[in-house]
Amino acid sequence: MMNPEKVSLKLSHFVKITRLNKLLILMTLAFIIAFSIFSLMYFPRLDITQNLYGFTTDFINLVVIFAIFFVVQCSRLAKKAYLYVSIGLMLWIVGSTADVLDEVIRQPFWISNYVEDLCRTLGMLITAYGLFKTMHFMQRMHNRLAQEFIMDDLTKVYNRRCFYQHVKGVVNNPYTVLIIDLDHFKRINDDYGHDVGDKVLKQFADKVNRLLKDENIFARIGGEEFAAYLPSYELDEVLNFSQTILETARTITVQNQRSKTVSIGIAHRTSDQTFDNVMKRADQALYRAKKAGRDRLEVALTS
Ligand SMILES: Nc1nc2c(ncn2[C@@H]2O[C@H](COP(=O)(O)OP(=O)(O)OP(=O)(O)O)[C@@H](O)[C@H]2O)c(=O)[nH]1
């Protein structure tokens, strides 16, 4: 089973991340230590007891930003987002380190002005832009997952989950369900291979999808089984549509040899029937169509 990646603040997570990420974390930590030692050695000290409050809050700021940096290094962001957030946070950490130290030593103007203020402000801006990029990336991922959740991977028509959810949600109106099953599909796989079988499924789904009106739903609900939802209750309209599907299937030839056929079971829903009942009747009608020789449609009696 695949292990989903985790975002964690635990130090044990450190061993699992890439070398580059480890190097960046260690280099940033080394910079904080080296900068502190250098400052303490070369600049005049201040009385820390006078600045204890400022020192504590600045130190907490630095720890929080470093923790965020650690999490970013342990996460899998999109390249650009990662780059901006990492550079931004590193600059921010440089500024914050100088900010902590100015409570302990008297810094020269160039450090307090350029290193502390400039790095921090620039760091914040670049981090903010990186976060914007991260959100953009998350939104794209969300859209893609939402799409994958309702689409069939192979045929790019709706999947069973989407079809069931949508049609079950129609409670007050009558409608018609078609269950469409490709005839002798196993033979295609056996004679020409699974790849050719997949191509036939894709071709059929694509062709039927083009016949649909906006309010219709067409989905792959099983291996070689499809279903269509029509809000229409007009028998003539439903029969015409089903007939077109039968004719469309016949236009598909497998390896230029056999032409494909399908069988269709049709069931209408009147006001008091459940979705499961409609599907069951459509399935029974499909079974009758298969038994009667395939390449045909059967309409279920209203129960
Ligand atoms: N290529 C391919 N084959 C699939 C896929 N899903 C299911 N199948 C095959 O579809 C075949 C269905 O076979 P059966 O249930 O015996 O039905 P059939 O051969 O179509 O016969 P009838 O339905 O009675 O006409 C099986 O061989 C499955 O392996 C798929 O995604 N791709």
Image: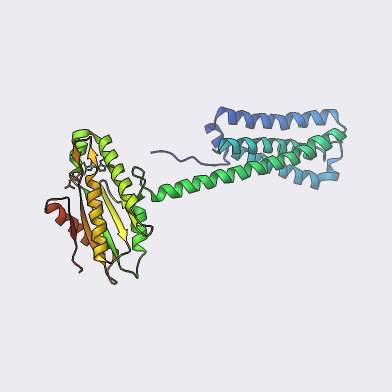
Q: Is residue 88 among the parts visible in the rendering?
A: yes
- Residue 149 position within the rendered picture, expressed as x and y whole percent measured from the top left: 41, 49
Tell me the residue at 66%/42% (across/down).
129
* Residue 96 location (% of width, % of height): 75, 39
Q: Position of residue 82 (x, y in %)?
A: 60, 37
Please indicate whether residue 83 sits to the left or right of residue 42 in the image: left
Most distant residue in the left direction: 292
Towards the viewer: 146 or 87:
146
Q: Is residue 300 left or right of residue 171?
A: left
In what quadrant of the picture does the N terminus appear? top left
* Residue at image location 28% in from the left, 51% down from the top: 226
Instruction: Assign ligand 1 to one image quadrant.
Output: top left
Residue situated furthest bottom in the rendering = 272
Query: Which residue is rendered at x = 78% and y = 38% of the image?
Result: 118
User: Quick check: 68 above or below 295?
Assistant: above
Quarter residue 275 falls in: bottom left
Would residue 277 be visible to someone looking at this image?
Answer: no
Color style of the picture: rainbow
* For residue 234, above or below residue 53: below
Kindly indicate the quadrant of the structure image that contains residue 297: bottom left
Residue pictured at 37% horizontal, 54% vertical: 162
**Percent coordinates x, y for residue 123 in the rendering:** 71, 39
As rendered, which of 90 and 152 lies closer to the eye?
152
